[in-house]
Amino acid sequence: MGPLNGYTVLELAGIGPAPMGGMILADMGAEVIRIDRAGTPPGLQMKDVSSRGKKSVAVNLKDPEGIETLLRMVENADVIIDPMRPGVCEKLGIGPDVCLERNPKIIFARMTGWGQEGPLAQAAGHDINYISITGALYAMGRKDEKPVAPLNLVGDMGGGGMLLVNGILAALLETANSGKGQVIDAAMVDGAAQLMWMFHGFQAMGMWNEKARESNLLDGGAHFYDTYECADGEYVSIGSIEPQFYALLKEKMELSEEEFGDQNNPALWPDLKVRLEEIFKTKTQAEWCELMEGTDVCFAPVLNFVDAPTHPANVARQTYIDVDGVTQPAPAPRFSRTPSEVRNGGSAAGADTADVLGAMGFGEEEVQALRTNGAIS
């Protein structure tokens, strides 16, 4: 059983970082109950990786009986995850004040893009927008070209889902001491800003040109920290930052000291990158792997996410698993005594309504009446 065994989390159905946070908590052993909208097509979540390990209760939150059903569930829970815009839960009658009145120990975790307050709080947005105003997007891309969106990993997932989980775990620790719940304002823009901490430090030390992409140590500017095309059209990555790793890179690639000896001179980086581009195209990705993989060059093949699960290192560590025919990342991090696990694949919307409500004290006739009245489905 995982380290969160015994905790109950109610996750209001949403997209992106909130269900990711719920997935991580479920992997760690919490009973995560997704509150789906009544009438949601029953098979919609079956292939959604973030639905793994969760149960589903379908509640009509536009029905007074549905609202009361959810609030009775809150009385039996430790956490509720709110993925909606600021004020929506309050309008429904399930805001933090109401929930804390029902359960003074509840952690009301709110996940939004712009945060609960501020001039953008009510505006729509997506990952690309949240990372735009933190400087993260500006820094990514090739020189003299437009910024390149890093999928939705920085705002939604790293700055959102991970921040949400971090806040919930900290709040649960505090509640164990105080006996009191609280509200968490987890904003993707705040999380993305935190992820940029290193670059604020670099800029303050005069080690980063914030206005020029592909001209710095970690943005593809350095010839020893970039990706290179191979003879077969595939790519490899190198990150030989430290002097000893760079020395090994020179040895493996037979690079002359005369040409490549001045590693940290940015004025030389563009020409040295051109030379490395020429050399890397002389071998296939597999040939470069045979020469460098597993050494201290800091090297890896660039794989797409479908091929990644078959890489020997990922196979050996069981980094990926198969759940109901869907290949997906295994739970992380790993615990020595209370291992995380995926207990089940995605539940169809409402599949667990009767069982969950019964376990929370609802009688069979009461559940049937709620179903008949349209409060649940």
Image (spheres, rainbow, N blue to C red):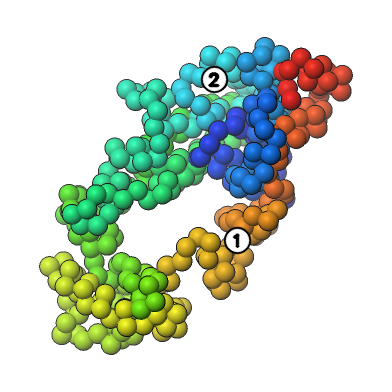
Residue displayed at 64% across by 26% down = 37
Q: Amino acid at mark 2?
A: Cys
Residue 203 position (above or below residue 167): below
Q: Amino acid at mark 1?
A: Tyr
N-term-proximal mark, 1 vs 2: 2
Residue 320 image label? 1
Q: Residue 345, percent across and down?
A: 69, 48
The C terminus: image quadrant: top right
Separation (CA) of disc 1 from disc 2? 36 Å
Residue 107 placement: quadrant: top right
Q: Secondary structure at mark 2?
A: helix
Q: Residue 260, percent across and down?
A: 20, 80
Residue 246 versus residue 36: which sits nearer the camera?
Answer: 36
Q: Residue 58, percent across and down?
A: 69, 28
Residue 265 versus residue 47: which sits nearer the camera?
Answer: 47
Residue 89 image label? 2
Residue 129 versus residue 73: which sits nearer the camera?
Answer: 129
